[in-house]
Image (cartoon, helix red, strand yellow):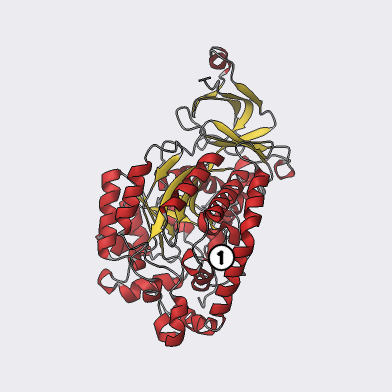
């Protein structure tokens, strides 16, 4: 087999987390195989190779570590633009897979590829896909993983599951919604399958190990309130035995925080304490959202070195509140950044998430200080890498690390004049400058054109499945119309419950 000669990126501005993040030094990056071989003046090393590497003139380009989308769901990428700003507990009934009939393999493939394509467009090289497949189908798992492999994206894959129905753990639903309507709400969170979900996921992991070079695995219990103690303890055991990271949602909305107070009194109403009792707190756990955390819970996360992944774009659209980003950083908690669902954030644009990460904390805490622009970039790279179990492998441009990176065009207006790379990436760039993306040492996009897959084929595949999906969405929306006034009353009861913290900007949250 003809050996890959490698890639030499010449005379680039190279972002260094520990260097000058305003005006990074220029230099070269030599890629051999799937790793970065050298950074700096590498001409001699490149010339000594048996075969000359492919050369990219990066005189007008910035090289960034590939972004890590540390919280993402590919199951609803085809629902972008379908919903206005609605409360989370309304959105889940309209958007999540248990509300829909079983999807075709063609739709599963199309939605996986269009989501991956959008990620690559915005410089994302790794996604943590917390995927809901309902009803569960092993063939659909293979479709998803093969799609990721074909497009060239790195994925930390974790099928999402629970063992308590959503209808039994969303506060105030049973109290406020007439019994005749309750059957319409059995579509928020549903048990994974007839088999024990941990056994299923462990079996999938064991049978797929080594099959795809950019694939790693994790465990994804939906949210603590939807998981029994037995389920969480079994997750902790499998995570420990196989060294698999664990991903879950927690305290995303005020209703979710209230659920802890209602259903977990033995743990002081804290879902964080509940996870700690199950043996899950620690560096292998990543908590998505974490909006309604109390000071005591933030202290527990810091003490146990538990990761947090914030998703500010989706949190705003679902009226869930403002995560305490500054408090996490000041407590030295590792923070990753995610773009979340396409149906609640509507885009996998990490630049939008970066902007809110750095800007939004000022709404509730206007004191000068963190987060700075460099904090946002750290969260989207090194912070995300640690959160998804890839620390030391991706997230920085250092010799020995995986060659996951993006080249941004510095001639774009957002970088002219160039005063600070970090601040202009975070506050002015929209993603239009992303020109080339390399994943695992392979160019997957160059000159904004995909090299691994036919983009027109993806668009045609999406167009073919959309009529059926839209018809099913229409049925779901009609089914829920009569229930919405009662859902609003249930949501308002949670909103009016005092839980000791406020994560809305107004004083009456």
Q: Position of residue 8 (x, y in %)?
A: 59, 23
Residue 72 in percent (x, y) is at 50, 54
SS type, badge 1 = helix
> Is 302 displayed left or right of 60 in the figure?
left
Instruction: Decide which of 434, 486 is in the foreground and name it.
Output: 486
Residue 145 in the image: state x and y as whole percent: 47, 45
Across and down, in percent, residue 406 comes to 59, 37
Quarter of the view holding residue 135: bottom left
Q: Is residue 55 left or right of residue 187?
A: right
- Front residue of 52/289: it is 52
| Viewer-side residue, 260 vs 203 | 203
Task: Write down the quadrant of residue 293 in the picture.
Answer: bottom left
For residue 484, say whether it is visible.
Answer: yes
Estimate how packed mark 1 is, as few (under 14), some (14 to 19) or many (20 or more) residues with alpha carbons within 10 Å.
Answer: many
487 displayed left or right of 83 = left
Query: Which residue appears at 47% of the width and 84% of the height?
Result: 181
Is residue 79 placed above or below 62 in the rendered structure? Answer: below
Q: Which residue is mark 1?
A: 316
Q: Is residue 110 left or right of residue 210?
A: right
């Amino acid at each position: 087999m003809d050996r890959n000669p490698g890639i030499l990126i010449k005379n680039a501005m190279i972002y260094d987390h520990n260097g000058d993040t305003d005006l990074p030094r220029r230099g070269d990056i030599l890629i051999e195989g799937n790793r970065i071989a050298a950074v700096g003046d590498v001409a001699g090393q490149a010339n000594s190779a048996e075969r000359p590497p492919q050369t990219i003139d990066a005189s007008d380009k910035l090289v960034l570590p590939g972004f890590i989308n540390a919280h993402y769901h590919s199951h609803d990428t085809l629902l972008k633009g379908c919903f206005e700003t609605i409360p989370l507990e309304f959105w889940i009934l309209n958007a999540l897979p248990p509300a829909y009939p079983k999807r075709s393999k063609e739709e599963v493939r199309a939605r996986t590829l269009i989501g991956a394509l959008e990620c690559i467009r915005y410089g994302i090289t790794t996604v943590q896909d917390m995927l809901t497949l309902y009803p569960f189908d092993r063939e659909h798992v293979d479709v998803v993983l093969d799609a990721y492999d074909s497009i060239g994206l790195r994925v930390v894959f974790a099928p999402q599951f629970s063992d308590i129905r959503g209808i039994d753990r969303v506060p105030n639903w049973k109290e406020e919604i007439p019994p005749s309507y309750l059957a319409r709400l059995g579509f928020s969170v549903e048990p994974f399958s007839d088999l024990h979900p941990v056994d299923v996921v462990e079996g999938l992991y064991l049978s797929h190990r080594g099959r795809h070079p950019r694939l790693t695995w994790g465990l994804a219990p939906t949210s603590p309130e939807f998981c029994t103690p037995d389920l969480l303890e079994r997750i902790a055991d499998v995570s420990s035995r196989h060294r698999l990271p664990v991903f879950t949602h927690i305290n995303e909305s005020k209703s979710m925080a209230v659920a802890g107070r209602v259903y977990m009194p033995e743990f002081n109403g804290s879902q964080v304490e509940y996870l700690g009792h199950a043996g899950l707190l620690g560096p292998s756990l990543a908590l998505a959202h974490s909006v309604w955390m109390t000071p005591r819970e933030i202290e527990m996360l810091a003490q146990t070195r538990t990761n947090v992944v914030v998703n500010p774009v989706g949190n705003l659209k679902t009226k869930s509140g403002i995560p305490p980003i500054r408090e996490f950083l000041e407590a030295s908690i590792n923070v990753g950044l995610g773009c979340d669902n396409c149906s609640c954030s509507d885009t996998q644009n990490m630049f939008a998430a970066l902007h809110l990460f750095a800007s939004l904390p000022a709404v509730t805490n206007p004191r000068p200080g963190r987060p700075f622009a460099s904090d946002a970039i750290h969260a989207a790279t090194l912070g995300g890498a640690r959160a998804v179990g890839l620390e030391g492998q991706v997230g920085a441009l250092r010799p020995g690390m995986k060659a996951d990176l993006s080249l941004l065009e510095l001639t774009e207006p957002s970088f002219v004049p160039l005063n600070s790379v970090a601040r202009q990436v975070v506050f002015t760039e929209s993603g239009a400058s992303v020109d080339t993306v390399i994943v695992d040492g392979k160019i997957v996009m160059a000159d904004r054109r995909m090299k691994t897959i036919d983009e027109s084929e993806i668009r045609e595949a999406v167009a073919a499945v959309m009529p059926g999906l839209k018809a099913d969405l229409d049925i779901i929306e009609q089914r829920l119309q009569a229930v919405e006034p009662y859902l609003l009353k249930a949501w308002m009861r949670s909103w009016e419950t005092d839980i000791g913290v406020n994560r809305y900007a107004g004083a009456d949250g």
